[in-house]
Amino acid sequence: MQHFPIFVALAGRRVVVSGGGEAALAKLRLLMKTEANLTVFAPDPAPEIAAWAEAGKLRLARRAMAPGDALCAVLFYAANEDAAQDARDVALARADGALANIVDNLQDSQFITPAIVDRDPVTVAIGTEGAAPVLARAIKRDLEERLPADLGPLARIGKAFRKVADALPMGRKRRDFWAAFYGGAGSEALRAGGEEAVRATLDTLLQAHLSEAPRPGRVLFVGAGPGDPDLLTLKARRALDEADVVIHDRLISPAILELARREAILVDAGKEGFGPSMSQADIDALIVEHASAGAQVVRLKSGDPTVFGRLDEEIDAVTAADIAWEIVPGITAASAAVATIGQSLTKRERNASVRFLTGHDMKGFADHDWKALARPGEVAAIYMGKRAARFIQGRLLMHGAGPDTPVTVIENASRPDQRILATTLAALASDLAQAALSGPALTLFGLAPRSAEATATRLMKEAL
Ligand code: SAH
């Protein structure tokens, strides 16, 4: 983040603009929404500017800027639409101590003005660090459509009610009250009976929340999917949005953690492959501790929580403490991986069942019904299979699996750094060793990428 967004209190502060054309007009229109003391320097101002000066909305000096003209100004805009003139005026303003912006010149500006969606007192500021004004405008258009026009009046009435609402204890109860107001009750009242009705609704809601018993703590075991935030379920998103505490595995991508409520406590419980992490007992205790204290706990697990997630141990702990819980399913790595290579996990006349295996369990390399798996056409999704690759390869070959059976390893499925290694059972261990994959990887036994024939070589090269 190159620019840090803040909202500056401009009431009564001095803001100086140099320039009298279109660029100055655009900035002044925005600035006149504030209560700043505006001064414009323009030898030849547009008629609108002259009229605003006339009406007392700003002070106009019909001349170019001179040293000292920006003294005590907090902000300065150079809007002459003339690079040399702008550079000269910015130098003057900076010497006077003002923070300076040159319109449409990111490089030489000390601050930039974001695109704004105005639902006063709610203001949404959109910045793209100058990367794409078109993008900013598209986002603005989208938000303009999404944010109801009555958001402004509602927020204004809500703001006036804040002191009264402080009767509610801080935390979840108060948040629930405001969520109910902004989540529909306020709008409904405004439509039905105007601002009076909104105030009455606030009173009723407050009474209801004051007399309600505090909501008990709860645990949601949420599947975060394979990494791409777009592969989260709506339910998972909502859970993150409402969480007080998020206890997550290390595999969870930062883009997903970003979606957690800003005030939520985030706890990294480790648990990545074989690395040292919090012990399972510690994690269980932590979940129970927070939920017992009344928190909405999200236990965020990669993929689907019910697949190799040690879910049952945690559910047992939560149940023993008499805490309510729920599972929110997620997209498991096998689904993401198979989608990546354009294949199906099951296919008529090839395989009518599919196995989810772990390469590794608590006791070491995991044993399976290798004989059954070695039959032609079988498909298995092997989790945590990187280290066990040589062992799995040996067992399958020993039980008669074809050495040329296709095997595809997908690392970081659905993430930007995804890699695909298409190989065969015979070459699996050596290809894997060469590829030196460092991220989580899923091994699809019995499947090659759909386009394998044409591109097998290219994919191999990519993976290496
Ligand atoms: N509950 C998870 C699996 C947890 S076990 C799920 O349903 O996906 C951890 C293993 O999952 C990793 O060792 C790896 O084999 C697999 N895995 C998780 N995320 C992955 C991803 N984005 N790409 C490939 N494999 C992944």
Image (cartoon, grey):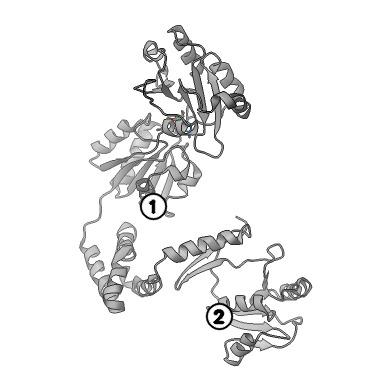
Residue labelled with disc 1: 241
Q: Secondary structure at mark 2?
A: loop
Task: Give percent across and percent down for residue 320.
Answer: 24, 36
Is 282 displayed left or right of 319 in the figure?
Answer: right
The residue at the point 75 percent across, 76 percent down is: 89
The residue at the point 43 percent across, 46 percent down is: 266
Task: Give percent across and percent down for residue 117.
Answer: 49, 68
For the image, the number of numbered tags is 2
Q: Secondary structure at mark 1?
A: helix
Q: Is residue 348 above or below residue 399?
A: below
Rounded to the nearest angstrom, the CA distance separating label 2 from label 1 is 36 Å
Foreground of the two, 411 or 253: 411
Q: Around disc 1, counting alpha carbons within 10 Å, would you say few (fewer than 14), some (14 to 19), or many (20 or more)?
A: some
Location of residue 130 by image quarter: bottom right
Q: Around disc 2, counting alpha carbons within 10 Å, would you say few (fewer than 14), some (14 to 19), or many (20 or more)?
A: some
Is 205 displayed left or right of 277 in the figure?
Answer: left
- Specify the amino acid type for callout 1: Asp
Residue that sits furthest to the bottom in the current view: 54
Q: Nearer the viewer, mark 2 or mark 1?
A: 2
Task: Give percent across and percent down for residue 124.
Answer: 49, 66
Q: Quadrant of the N terminus?
A: bottom right
Foreground of the two, 400 or 261: 400
Residue labelled with disc 2: 32
Location of residue 322 by image quarter: top left
Location of residue 9 by image quarter: bottom right
Q: Is residue 167 visible?
A: no
The residue at the point 45 percent across, 45 percent down is: 230
- Specify the amino acid type for callout 2: Met
Task: Give percent across and percent down for residue 253.
Answer: 49, 41
The residue at the point 39 percent across, 20 percent down is: 350
Foreground of the two, 122 or 279: 122
Q: Is residue 347 above or below residue 265?
A: above
